[in-house]
Amino acid sequence: MCDQPYPQAVIFDLDGVITDTAEFHFQAWQQLAQKLGIEIDRAFNEQLKGVNRADSLACILRHGGQEQVWPPEARQQFMTEKNDLYRQLLANLTPADILPGILPLLAAVRAAGCRIGLASVSENAPQVLASLGLSDRFDFCADARALSHSKPHPEIFLTACQGLGVDPRQSIGIEDAQAGITAINANGMYSVGIGATLTEADYRLNHTGELAWPDLLAHWQAAQVCPDTLITRS
Ligand code: B16
Ligand code: MG
């Protein structure tokens, strides 16, 4: 029997995991879409979670049959309008908006000696973390502006692992978006999904209030292969 290992890092998504800004993104996109005569609802919005601004707009225009209608300058203007609406909604964000279970989890991960990272494709992530009073709780935050690909591409979680100096196969990623689960799994990380409809997460919970470090650690450890015996823990 080998010693129970610990993960090297836990890497968090932001929107929908640390705080419910996913709802603000939806409201801002819905307002813009309405202006263009396109109806979107919360079910449609699931596709936009974890998807960057330009790809989200493309998805909405495709949904409304307007994919070929707007030139790049108009698209840029739409993205600016959406971001202005989103930032207005962000103005009232405070530490009270941190989702249940997140502060105790951050404290427990830190106490366990694991590194803490952020993998958000939002260019507003630094402002959101500052408004929540969490900027100094992360050892490394991937820079959304420096990415070539949005989730479900693995790039952002790999970038976070590299920035933290950890092995993805020894790290946990926590996500509320199906695209994010795909990105985590593609790196060989252990995926934790927050949400009833997510598939293919190694460990899935309905909401962040169910996140508890002892449970998470036990599930992660159970999924590890003991190197000296090559027996999967149960
Ligand atoms: P911004 P995450 C993502 O953040 C959101 O889920 C997605 O809905 C949004 O379009 C994207 O950030 C870009 O955000 O417009 O602020 O740059 O879930 O990766 O934390
Ligand atoms: Mg998210």
Image (cartoon, helix red, strand yellow):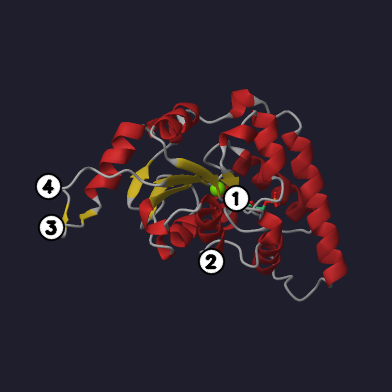
Left or right of 1? Residue 19 is right
Disc 2 crowd, CA 10 A, few/some/many (<14, 14-19, 20+):
some
Residue type, label 1: Ser
Residue with the mark numbered 1? 120
Mark 2 or 4: in front is 4
Res. 3 image quadrant: top left
Mark 3 or 2: in front is 3
Residues under labels 3 and 2: Cα distance? Answer: 33 Å
Residues under labels 1 and 2: Cα distance? Answer: 13 Å
Identify the disc placed on residue 1.
4
The secondary structure type at the circle numbered 2 is loop
Residue with the mark numbered 3? 229
Q: Nearer the viewer, residue 58 or 64?
A: 58
Residues under labels 3 and 1: Cα distance? Answer: 37 Å
Task: Mark 1 and ligand 1: say if the CB distance to the nearest ligand atom is below 8 Å.
Answer: yes
Left or right of 61? Residue 168 is left
The secondary structure type at the circle numbered 3 is loop
Mark found first going from the N terminus, 2 or 4: 4
Mark found first going from the N terminus, 1 or 2: 1
Q: Nearer the viewer, residue 188 or 227?
A: 227
